[in-house]
Amino acid sequence: MALIQGRFIDNIGRVYAIYTGGFVAFILLMAILEQLGVGADTIGILFVAFTIAIYALIGWLSRTMEVDAYYVAGRQVPAVYNGMATAADWMSGASFVALAGGVYFGGYGYMAFIVGWTGGYLLVNSLMAPYLRKFGCYTVPDFIGTRYGGNLARLCAVIVLVVASFTYVTAQINATGTIAARALHIPFSWGVWLGLLGILLCSMLGGMRAVTWTQVAQYIVLIVAYLVPVIWMSNVQGFGIIPHFTYGEAASTMAQLEAQYGLNPPAEAIAGLSVLTTPHTGPVGDYAEWKFITLALCMMCGTASLPHILMRYFTTPTVRSARKSVAWSLLFIFLLYFTAPALATLTKLQLLDPNLPTAIIGKPFEEVASLAWIQNWASVGFLAISDQNGDGILQLNEFFMRPDIVVLATPEIAGLPYVISGLVAAGGMAAAMSTADGLLLAIANALSHDLYYKMIDPKADTAVRLIVARVLLFGIGALGALIASLQLTGILGAVAWAFCFACSGLFFPLVLGVWWKRANRPGAVAGMAAGFISGVLYLYYVYTGGTPWFGLDHLRFGIVGMAVSLISMVVVTLLTPAPDEEIQRMVEETRVPTGPAILADKH
């Protein structure tokens, strides 16, 4: 222990260097065990169990009974580590598990997710994070309630936060269930509860402090797990070890193969699974460019409105650190998002290119059906092949796959050692758990701090507040697991809804709260209520069969919500009295990067 003396925060670099070295050693140990004949299932279980145990240990060591540590990690997280934690918080099951699958099946149009999620950080950096940190709030509703005054504005923010974050967290628990089902060979419905157990172990005792340090550890695991198979495939296919700049030729080959095999719908669909019917490159259908732009815009504004992301910047020591932290976040996130399209392209090539030994399209049906990875994924209902035309040859529209498993199945598709499959499963679990931790904490903190402490029992002591937060964390997590087990929608669809809920209700009240000192309470309440309700009604309209307006389908209902929110907030604000002088001075002070926070450290 001579290597680590003094406070954890003073040794943080050394601690995570040791952790990273230990994780690499564990990967090498699993590779040796595989060579010695240890079964693939055992290696998969060891990967998932070992990493979850490490996260739980960090969560236990970070336990606290201090309000400041529980809600904002004591406001002492260095910028670079907060950037890593934010990247882990951000790169959810949707980013790690589902994004490449979306590009695989949806092609060009799904690149809008990458553009929007990355571009959203520019909005966070320029419009939100430094100023909310200067304000000194614990939660996003805390900012709304203090900036605009009154419990009604705070309550509206809590409602939008809970709906958006809960929708998001069900998608993350869905992802943990998908990974656990495959890695541990258990039913999906059991997998979601197992995933919830791991999530709660990380967050219940230590709140934001525990979540922060586990998210840093999870980022290291997930980025290694995402990059290794892509680099390996690229090298095997002849595109070098950095495919990000060289896989254009693969995309051209893909277009030729798609034309050769035909992108036709199946003769008979299989519920929950998809076949490839969309070209890999180029816009498709009516309003294609408009749909790309509106989806990217919803993801950008949703990014700048999601409370679990914004509250990460409340944990830095200073406003300057918050701004630097956003830049680090963008770098760490870029590493994964820049890789996702390459992964989708190279994986598709592994299946379609007849020059590669792993290709299955155009091969005899019986030969493909005998492959171990086909049988493994089919056994849990995530993949199917069906000789629907009876010619004995597997056609492109006879290969069915759940989009959410593309990343997880890639090592097996590419014929990589099983240790890589275990690594990817551990990475996917880390991504889903890190985001779910942040989301559950955002919901529980909003309910315990803004609803219970600020509105119901302002005299509650610290112990009671933290007990309420932990009980809520457990209850909300259990409800999320129950909803996730019903598999009402795919991971990427649920995440898009969460972003649209958040930007419909919160984007303009947050932005104008910082940048328009004339904005007042009635306007903010009108903006949150009208934006959120109109967005929900439009989602119901299109989801139940209504004709979308100008191509604005259920993934883009945030455009309607944001438009209504902006108009309502501006009109109502201008028709009602301006905020008093004290509020307007507070808004001006918020924009000054130096000086103490607006709110007291403990409030």
Image (cartoon, rainbow, N blue to C red):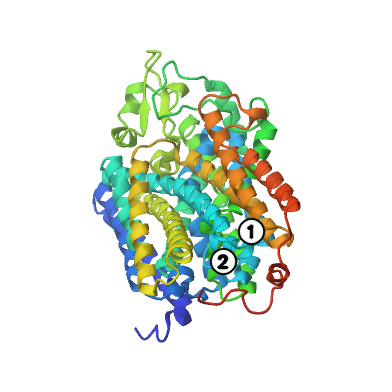
Front residue of this view, candidates 589 and 411: 589
Tell me, for residue 313, which label it has, or none. 2
Residue denoted by label 1 = 124
**Residue 358 is drawn in which quadrant?**
top left
Percent across and percent down for residue 537 are 56, 35
Callouts 2 and 1 close, C-beta under 8 Å = yes
Front residue of this view, candidates 278 and 153: 153
Q: Secondary structure at mark 2?
A: helix
**Residue 485 is drawn in which quadrant?**
top left
Quadrant of image for the N terminus: bottom left
The three-letter code of the residue at mark 2 reads: Tyr
Q: Residue at x 75, y 50 (%)?
A: 575
Q: Residue at x 45, y 80 (%)?
A: 11
Percent across and percent down for residue 102 are 52, 38
Q: Is residue 482 above or below residue 51?
A: above
The three-letter code of the residue at mark 1 reads: Val
Percent across and percent down for residue 43 are 28, 52
Front residue of this view, candidates 300 and 41: 300
Q: Secondary structure at mark 1?
A: helix
Percent across and percent down for residue 565 are 65, 45
Front residue of this view, candidates 547 and 323: 547
Q: Between marks 2 and 1, how big is the CA–CA gap?
A: 10 Å
